[in-house]
Image: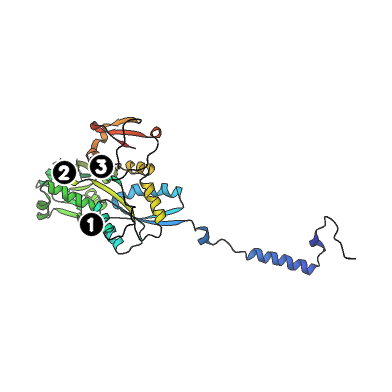
């Protein structure tokens, strides 16, 4: 009769020892050689974005990236420099996913060459030019026209050919008929980017400098002498777009959407950037801060695009100075 296994008996117990040993060894070897999840497979959903951004965006974009990375499996690497310099890098084929410029001209040049992904270009912030100095060294300097004073030895500005802040500075000086005069007197010192210009005046290498209001705000040593009106510089708008050659265009679009979102705009305004659109007065709570009227004239024009906004119940506004024009915070 065929052998019958007793009920509820472990069948491995009745196997010959050699067979049982072989089975156990096979199981152990299988466990040892089981394919592990490769690093590439485990990171298949992770992306690294390279963002080339104007030097004046350093602090704001670094914080934006921290918030963005906390929400999506994307690592953001930055290349901060003058917008014109970054434009040249993109033209030479540098592996850049997103370009954020402090002026329209570099964007226009790239768009003309078909180097930007269509329909991704947006404006996301605005700024203002200011004259700064170490007041103890220049008590005679009260306004832009005082730069004609013979006591001025050196004035730092960005290189107008590659640095948007320098281009705006040249406009403002030409408005006062000062640029040619200072150039002939060899009093102009050009910086490779706006942060370098700020460093020149902080270190006492020049008497004064023309920089963005956001750059002056992060300095603990210089004082704003005068704020340059919009009529002297034209609107100072910041632009952002996906570079056409990007291999991560979807993630690049998501980063741009975050920059123009309510949260992104909050961070930018924390660092002194102006918002990209007006908001209606109704349905918002107001808190007036007369000390913040310094940048009003920089937004006297229609926005190109506007960010998504939180519901009115979750938003608050502050009025900037006596004109009571309102901006989201």
What residue lies at 13% left-to-right and 49% top-to-bottom? Answer: 174
Q: Is residue 252 above or below residue 278?
A: below
What residue lies at 27% left-to-right and 35% top-to-bottom? Answer: 292
What residue lies at 22% left-to-right and 41% top-to-bottom? Answer: 224
Label 2 secondary element: loop
Mark-to-mark CA distance, 1 and 3: 26 Å
Mark-to-mark CA distance, 3 and 2: 38 Å
Is 261 or 273 nearer to us in this picture?
261
Is 224 or 99 nearer to us in this picture?
99
Are there few (<14), some (14-19), or many (20+) residues within 10 Å of tag 2?
Answer: some
| Numbered circle sitting on residue 162 | 1
Q: Is residue 76 left or right of residue 194?
A: right
- x and y, in percent, of residue 235 in the image: 22, 45
Q: How is the image coloured?
A: rainbow
What residue lies at 32% left-to-right and 41% top-to-bottom? Answer: 269
| Image quadrant in which the N terminus is located | bottom right
Label 3 secondary element: loop
Instruction: Identify residue for label 2.
Output: 138
Instruction: Identify residue for label 3.
Output: 302
Q: Is residue 21 above or below residue 237?
A: below
Are there few (<14), some (14-19), or many (20+) residues within 10 Å of tag 1?
Answer: many
Q: Which one is in front in this view, the residue at disc 2 or the one at disc 1?
A: 1
- x and y, in percent, of residue 110 in the image: 28, 58
- Which sits earlier in the primary sequence, circle 3 or circle 2? 2
Q: Which one is in front in this view, the residue at disc 1 or the one at disc 3?
A: 3
| Image quadrant in which the C terminus is located | top left
- x and y, in percent, of residue 267 in the image: 36, 43
Q: Quadrant of residue 98?
A: bottom left
């Amino acid at each position: 009769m065929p052998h019958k296994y007793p009920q509820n008996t472990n069948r491995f117990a009745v196997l010959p020892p050699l067979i049982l040993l072989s089975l156990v060894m096979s199981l152990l070897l299988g466990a040892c050689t089981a394919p592990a999840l490769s690093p590439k497979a485990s990171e298949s959903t992770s992306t690294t974005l390279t963002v080339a951004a104007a030097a004046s965006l350093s602090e704001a974009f670094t914080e934006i990236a921290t918030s963005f990375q906390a929400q999506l499996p994307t690592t953001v690497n930055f290349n901060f420099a003058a917008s014109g310099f970054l434009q040249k890098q993109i033209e030479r084929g540098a592996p850049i996913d997103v370009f954020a410029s402090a002026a329209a001209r570099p964007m226009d040049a790239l768009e003309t060459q078909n180097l930007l992904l269509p329909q991704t270009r947006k404006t996301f912030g605005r700024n203002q030019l200011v004259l700064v100095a170490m007041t103890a060294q220049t008590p005679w300097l009260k306004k832009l026209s005082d730069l004609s004073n013979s006591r001025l030895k050196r004035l730092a500005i960005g290189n107008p050919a590659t640095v948007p802040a320098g281009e705006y500075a040249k406009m403002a000086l030409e408005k006062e008929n000062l640029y040619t005069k200072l150039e002939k007197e060899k009093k102009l010192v050009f910086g490779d980017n706006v942060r370098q210009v700020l460093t020149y005046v902080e270190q006492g290498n020049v008497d004064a400098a023309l920089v963005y209001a956001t750059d002056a705000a992060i300095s603990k040593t210089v004082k704003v002498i005068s704020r340059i009106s919009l009529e002297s510089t034209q609107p100072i708008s910041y632009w952002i777009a996906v570079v056409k050659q990007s291999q991560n265009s979807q993630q690049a679009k998501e980063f741009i959407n975050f920059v123009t979102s309510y949260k992104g705009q909050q961070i930018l305004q924390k660092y002194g950037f102006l918002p990209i659109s007006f908001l209606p007065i109704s349905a918002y709570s107001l808190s007036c801060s007369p000390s913040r009227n310094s940048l009003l004239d920089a937004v006297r024009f229609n926005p190109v695009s506007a960010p998504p906004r939180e519901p009115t119940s979750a938003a608050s506004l502050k009025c900037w100075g006596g004109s009571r024009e309102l901006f989201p915070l």
